[in-house]
Image (cartoon, coloured by chain):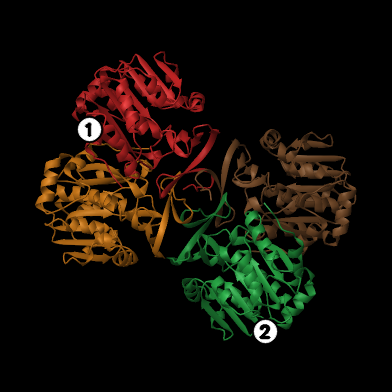
Chain colours: A brown, B green, C orange, D red
Amino acid sequence: MSSSDGLVIIEPVSEYTRQILKLKKIYAVEKTPYQEIVFAELEGFGKALLIDEFVQSTEKDEFIYHELLVHPAMALHPEPKRVLIIGGGEGASLREVLKHGTVEDAVMVDIDEKVVEFSKRFLEVMHRGSFFDPRARVVIMDGLEYVKKTADGTFDVVVMDLTDPYAGPTALPLYSYEAFREIKRILKPEGVMATQAGSSYFYPKEYRQVKENIEKNFKHVAEYWAWIPSFATNVNFIVASDAYDLYGLSAEMFDTRLKSRNVNTKYLVGRRLTAHLSMGVLYG
Amino acid sequence: MSSSDGLVIIEPVSEYTRQILKLKKIYAVEKTPYQEIVFAELEGFGKALLIDEFVQSTEKDEFIYHELLVHPAMALHPEPKRVLIIGGGEGASLREVLKHGTVEDAVMVDIDEKVVEFSKRFLEVMHRGSFFDPRARVVIMDGLEYVKKTADGTFDVVVMDLTDPYAGPTALPLYSYEAFREIKRILKPEGVMATQAGSSYFYPKEYRQVKENIEKNFKHVAEYWAWIPSFATNVNFIVASDAYDLYGLSAEMFDTRLKSRNVNTKYLVGRRLTAHLSMGVLYG
Amino acid sequence: MSSSDGLVIIEPVSEYTRQILKLKKIYAVEKTPYQEIVFAELEGFGKALLIDEFVQSTEKDEFIYHELLVHPAMALHPEPKRVLIIGGGEGASLREVLKHGTVEDAVMVDIDEKVVEFSKRFLEVMHRGSFFDPRARVVIMDGLEYVKKTADGTFDVVVMDLTDPYAGPTALPLYSYEAFREIKRILKPEGVMATQAGSSYFYPKEYRQVKENIEKNFKHVAEYWAWIPSFATNVNFIVASDAYDLYGLSAEMFDTRLKSRNVNTKYLVGRRLTAHLSMGVLYG
Amino acid sequence: MSSSDGLVIIEPVSEYTRQILKLKKIYAVEKTPYQEIVFAELEGFGKALLIDEFVQSTEKDEFIYHELLVHPAMALHPEPKRVLIIGGGEGASLREVLKHGTVEDAVMVDIDEKVVEFSKRFLEVMHRGSFFDPRARVVIMDGLEYVKKTADGTFDVVVMDLTDPYAGPTALPLYSYEAFREIKRILKPEGVMATQAGSSYFYPKEYRQVKENIEKNFKHVAEYWAWIPSFATNVNFIVASDAYDLYGLSAEMFDTRLKSRNVNTKYLVGRRLTAHLSMGVLYG
């Protein structure tokens, strides 16, 4: 077993545990006005983006996270054409959204220019060129501000791919009651939203707050979670809509919709989605 | 967020990651002839047993692990009367086994006297007195040796609750082809066995080897896994039998059998078992 | 090279560095009303006392620290009979003081009963029975309170063997201007005091403050420092007196006085003391 | 006190201790054919060069190390004109050598082109332009090979500024008996050599071996050591010559020679050198 000596990241996984990750290479370390970002190659996990000491995405396992974030909401909507991604700077959520043949416009709004710039340069393995898809548009702007300036009923699907609700001040306002009210406003009546919401196990209070803020705004709210290996913890997802209920989406319908839109996945198939939805949330 | 300064355990979760766990209290640290054992109170996880630097059980989340290890195999058997537990020194597997009203004899064989002695003293919260149940018997002996000395067709269920196949030399022989052959021999024809098998994600080669050794000996082999928060990783379980197939056990049947035997669980219900069985194994 | 996995102490050596120390055995971990104390065996350093995450003394190198703290002040005084030690719970300063044949009474005042109790039990290798010397008396009491209640001109030498000025709130009041004024008051006119004062390199502001508080009370103030291997940093000492100047004590006189009092040392001889006094203080 | 979370270096200071250093910025991380090099900015210590996980030089305290390595040997020689530096890639030893007005040629031989290239780019604060001094010449070559190809009696002073004898295989051959024989051969009869030799405290066996190899080749051998804050340990130096004895160099002579050659130092003055030489070596 290799030692943990040398260049490492010590990540505060929970209030009382840390993860030590070994670094093989460092592409960029930068303090932006919003956060501290690290683009690196991790031992065992490959290329990775870390924000404020938290692993965001690694080459080896980001597909689990991004497929779970994007496809349930997208599949729940019968024909998602206009999609908004808030955050998601490394381009992997955009990549998954664009897989859906129904999509005509995908707007990605990220507050941090540097994240996008370095992702383009170092994380091709994640964005896979999605930044340059003619249907895609990247806006550098505060997500909440963008939402506020957007007209009512603009989007079919909104995907929130932000840092954890407890990770720092940058993303926090986007998890508020007001933010979800605004997101609902810019969705069409049949619109669907999805968000990651951190770990319900290690941050039950923060998770419940996010869920409550969503429930006050949407009629149907579904929750599911997964263990992401490089996070050393689980992560929770919430999908909400006034029109559709994710708990009512059968495994078959999920598979059928993905297939009809030419979406290929490595992790998420209908059977697994159903399993995730049956698991129930874990509170620590 | 509290810092990681002070008394901690640095746990080698995988070949390339570590977990740092904060210690609040230490009850005992001992190098036995077999392993190094630590009985402590962990920040956030409560009382805990660690063997050779690996978390085995913590007060807060051991029920997830022990319910998943014990009840699928027990529920799969229509009437488990005689049960053998190999390992399981802190008494929690024994506790779960004894919940089943059908059980008449439960033998627990652990190689390490010290683990059992200290568990009795410090981990009442885990064993819950199961060591003193009149149906229980604890044998201090090498598990494989015990199995070899046991007559054919002695047990209805065998539960292996050992350290990981890659954790060190003590448990390794019990994961071999020969060991499973012997375990099958001492099971009745309708017998069922269950084992934990480490993390298929971080140790795919070792996990596959264990699975292969089981498959060569049993007709029906089912696998499932779970994230255990204090492990900072997942853990895999395998249930095998010549008579019964866990994949064929419905959620309803699971719930019915547990109920008829007066088994109460905190985590595992039929719906969740089905979800676990549908998840598929993750290889890293 | 052995890894740093397993049971360790992460010690905040400075504001920006940590030391990881491997633990072989733990004798006691206790949160007292004053501090958190750990009695352990450290890999490479042997038995050790840690207070509030800081190494205080280890079997292997405590003689360097305690000889440097005690003997310069003791040798500077022509005939130290009555000596007060404030702190010094593990008994090693007391041991060094009692080596001086001139000593008739040595009072050790420690605020923390538990430190003394466990030191008696686990650190015989340090106190060497000094607690039971008929000339020694241990008082469990706040050091400052003891000093305030002591009559003027009671002691020939006062040795302060406390945690660092920046280590926490327990020792801090004893490094104040008022505390040194009181210490001067209870010294005879020819009295000498010595204190450790933390690391001038990593805590220059805190060190200068202590020095200033001493200089305002005493005519002669001498300073010297040493690297203590198990501290992973240096530690500074200050000796003060109205009657004698340590800078004027020749190496020969130091050796002569120690010899005439039957004091044997492992580290400190006159030549080395002179070298320490010529080194000058390092500020980081 | 800032936490140790985030980007850090875990440095194996000894067989049983580690130092955690916080990184503020990373300029370059590179695996060369010889070693792994990191150019970074450390919290508290400023710009720094690390080789194979060991701190080599930091902006804040490298002057202590480099003045102690270079000036005793240089001052011991009455008129050093031709000087060879083996290793010393960041250019700080070269900087100190060139301060001596007597120097006409200074050759620096480093095996690792990358160390020199990145030092030129990122560590101006260390080399201070010395690479571009007309008296300086940098040769990229294995040090021992260079020495072997050099004619008898070429240099007045040889300074070895290598990684520790126990740090890895790259520098080790240069600490052998044969290497010192060759170094003596290329020195003039009145020549002087100096080397760092790692920590005698944490690696007594390795240090003694180096000293023995030098003693077998030179008539006069002097040793001294210092605590280097960013190393979290001490470092030992050895100066050897057939003509001159460093123990015989008075503080006054040291100061006079430095002054006459227009050498300014921040740490090392005659009084301090004498103190270092009187300290005696510490073996752990």
- The residue nearer to you, when weighing C255 against B183, is B183
Q: x%, y% of residue C162?
A: 31, 55
Q: Residues within 10 Å of mark 2 (few under 14, many from 20)?
A: some
Residue topped by disc 2: B101
Question: Helix, strand or loop at disc 1?
Answer: helix
Determine the residue positioned at 43% across, 31% down: D59
> In the image, what residue type sits under mark 1?
Thr
Determine the residue positioned at 74% across, 59% down: B280
- Distance CA(mark 2)–CA(mark 1): 83 Å
Residue topped by disc 1: D274
**Camera sees residue D265:** no
Which label sits in the foreground, 2 or 1?
2
**Camera sees residue D273:** yes
Q: x%, y% of residue C192?
A: 18, 50
Q: Is residue A67 above or below residue A34?
A: below
Q: x%, y% of residue D230?
A: 41, 39
Q: Is residue D229 above or below residue B111?
A: above
- Can marks 2 and 1 be said to lie on one chain? no
Read off the chain for label 1: D
> In the image, what residue type sits under mark 2?
Gly
Question: Helix, strand or loop at disc 2?
Answer: loop
- Residue C74 lies left or right of residue D206; in this view the side is left
Read off the chain for label 2: B
